């Protein structure tokens, strides 16, 4: 079954530390491109969250919005070099005993020393809140995938209907092609006879028929029709396959359009030309659809 690359999914997870809300939107893209819009405190989780989304999405551009209410988003850690602090305190005691200072040094005087204490930013998410973020992203990705699946089912029905109509048009060309070649041969033969009558030259009848046949064969579109039937069959088979298939279908639509153009230029028939116009119109609609398929 087909999957669309367009979809939306959301999820909200409540934890003891706060609420996590996730929204995802996806659109067409040649590859799998995932962009996050979230607090910097979640940056360290990006690779993990990306893998969760890729379990559900193989192609398309996905924008992920993560918001948090409550919880500790970012805190600061005070890191103390305790060994160095003890050395400072020991030296301070010695100085006090030697009456070097009139008043005692305060502890904060040491803690403010850049070599003793350093204030560093760190993520303040605990394991429970972190698990809640992963859960919310996984649920939103599942909802996104479900929507893409439903839209893909609609796309598949539409493409199957269009493919059926396209096959009928190819069948019409197949049935009309022999008579088109024969009519072209007869018209060409008649024109050649008229031209020779005007000049008074009497050509060899068999040679005239042979030349007319050679030129009329250039209007034969049987090879193109055969390839179109083959492309239609492949298209139908791919629709029933599992996995990513948008690129394959896009390639086949391009090939079918190329064969239709060749038929239109070779046939030299107004009737077949009209069928080709209808085919190209249908193929253009199919192209728009397959470019939205994962």
Image (cartoon, rainbow, N blue to C red):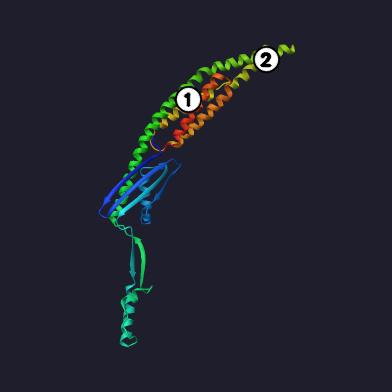
Question: In the picture shown, does residue 95 fall above or below 278?
Answer: below
Which residue is tagged 2? 192
Question: In the picture shown, does residue 212 fall above or below 37?
Answer: above
Q: Quadrant of the N terminus?
A: top left
Along the line of sight, the residue nearer the viewer: 116 or 187: 116
Rendered location of residue 63, percent (x, y): 40, 46
Rendered location of residue 21, percent (x, y): 32, 49
Q: Residue at x 33, y 82 (%)?
A: 92
Rendered location of residue 99, percent (x, y): 32, 88
Q: Label 1, secondary structure: give it.
A: helix
Rendered location of residue 23, percent (x, y): 35, 46
Q: CA distance from mark 1 to mark 2?
A: 35 Å
Residue 229: mark: 1
The quarter holding residue 86 reads: bottom left
The answer to whether residue 251 of the structure is visible from this angle is yes
The answer to whether residue 1 of the structure is visible from this angle is no
Q: Quadrant of the C terminus?
A: top left
Along the line of sight, the residue nearer the viewer: 140 or 236: 140
Q: Label 2, secondary structure: give it.
A: helix
The quarter holding residue 70 reads: bottom left
Other residues around mark 1 within 10 Å, as few (<14) / some (14–19) / many (≥20): some
Other residues around mark 2 within 10 Å, as few (<14) / some (14–19) / many (≥20): some
For marks 1 and 2, the one nearer the N-term is 2
Question: In the picture shown, does residue 58 fall above or below 185?
Answer: below
């Amino acid at each position: 079954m087909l999957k669309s690359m367009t979809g939306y999914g959301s999820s909200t997870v409540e934890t003891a530390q706060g609420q996590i809300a996730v929204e995802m939107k996806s659109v067409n893209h040649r590859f799998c491109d995932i962009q996050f819009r979230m607090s910097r405190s979640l940056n360290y989780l990006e690779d993990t969250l990306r893998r969760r989304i890729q379990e559900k999405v193989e192609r398309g551009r996905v924008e992920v919005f993560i918001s948090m209410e409550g919880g500790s988003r970012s805190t600061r850690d005070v890191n103390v070099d305790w060994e160095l602090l003890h050395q400072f305190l020991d030296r301070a005691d010695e100085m006090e005993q030697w009456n070097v200072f009139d008043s005692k040094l305060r502890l904060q005087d040491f803690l403010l020393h850049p070599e003793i204490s350093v204030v560093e930013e760190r993520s303040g998410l605990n394991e429970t809140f972190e698990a809640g973020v992963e859960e919310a992203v996984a649920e939103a990705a599942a909802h996104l995938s479900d929507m893409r699946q439903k839209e893909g089912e609609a796309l598949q029905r539409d493409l199957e209907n269009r493919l059926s109509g396209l096959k009928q048009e190819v069948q019409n060309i197949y049935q009309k092609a022999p008579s088109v070649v024969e009519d072209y041969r007869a018209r060409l033969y008649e024109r050649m006879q008229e031209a020779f009558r005007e000049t008074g030259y009497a050509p060899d009848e068999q040679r005239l028929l042979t030349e007319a046949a050679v030129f009329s064969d250039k209007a034969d579109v049987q090879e193109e029709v055969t390839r179109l039937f083959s492309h239609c069959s492949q298209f139908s088979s791919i629709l029933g396959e599992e996995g990513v298939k948008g690129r394959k279908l896009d390639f086949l639509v391009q090939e079918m359009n190329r064969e239709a153009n060749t038929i239109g230029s070779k046939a030299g028939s107004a009737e077949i030309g009209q069928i080709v116009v209808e085919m190209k119109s249908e193929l253009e609609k199919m192209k728009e659809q397959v470019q939205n398929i994962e």
